[in-house]
Image (cartoon, helix red, strand yellow):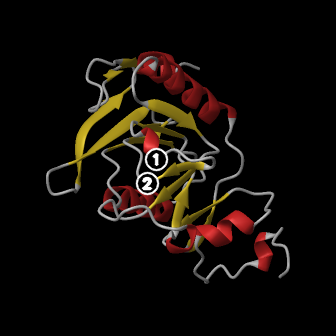
Amino acid sequence: MAKITELSQLDLNGTYSYADYLTWQLAETVELIKGKIMAMSPAPNVKHQRVARDLLIPIDRYLRGKSCEIFIAPFDVKLYNSRKSKLSDQEVFSVVQPDLCVICDKNKLTEQGCDGAPDWIIEILSPGNSKKELHLKYDLYQENGVTEYWMVHPYEQTVYQFVLNKDEKYQLHAMYAGDDLATPYLFPELQIDLADVFAE
């Protein structure tokens, strides 16, 4: 079987599993959403990286000594229906690389990343993110039981905080902007000063 080193060698209309994904040796980073290849935006810019760092630091500091851990991309997150037990790589059709994710169940951690839904995912949007991509990930995270999902807009300096309700549907829990103190639903004692996060 030919070694896959270029995206052009793959059928972008085909359906692929995580087992297929593990065999690819691509220069660019891709994600799989329900078996479909999603090329990620080009390498994150400076603003994106600063926002990621300035979110990571206070969250990591808060979680030290606790059972939860934060991870930063690149980091494979395999997603599938949260009611199912662990699946083999051939049975998993979604793998994403969230900018930041918090995992509280150590049993989900593998050599490659996370096997199952993280508790909290933070995506930092870039000008290149398409509406389609945003909708696909929102639906994917909701369907697979990610309890809390933050969409961070660095250029608008806003954070949209979604939390699963009792019907396992996302509700907009809060919207933060500018120099607000953003408080995770899962960690109400943690306050993140957005003035620091969005500082130029």
Q: Is residue 172 at all visible to an observer of this figure?
A: yes
Label 2 secondary element: loop
Q: How many labels sit on residues? A: 2
Label 1 Cα neighbours within 10 Å, binned few <14 / some 14-19 / many ≥20: some
Query: Pointers 2 and 1 in contact (CB under 8 A)?
Result: yes
Residue closer to the observer: 77 or 195: 77
Q: Residue at x 45, y 39 (%)?
A: 106
Question: Residue 144: percent from the left, percent from the top?
Answer: 35, 59
Residue on which the image places disc 2: 116
Name the amino acid type tagged 1: Lys
Q: Earlier in the sequence, mark 2 or mark 1?
A: 1
Q: Is residue 198 visible?
A: no
Q: Is residue 46 left or right of residue 105?
A: right
Residue 121 in the image: state x and y as whole percent.
43, 43
In percent of width and height, residue 80 lies at 41, 64
Locate residue 2: give its quadrant: bottom right
- Asked which quadrant contains residue 16, the reply is bottom right
> Is 151 placed left or right of 184 in the picture?
right
Amino acid under disc 2: Gly
Which numbered disc covers residue 108?
Answer: 1
Q: Is residue 132 above or below residue 51?
A: below
Residue 174 x, y percent position in the rendering: 25, 35
Residue drawn at 61 percent across, 83 percent down: 13
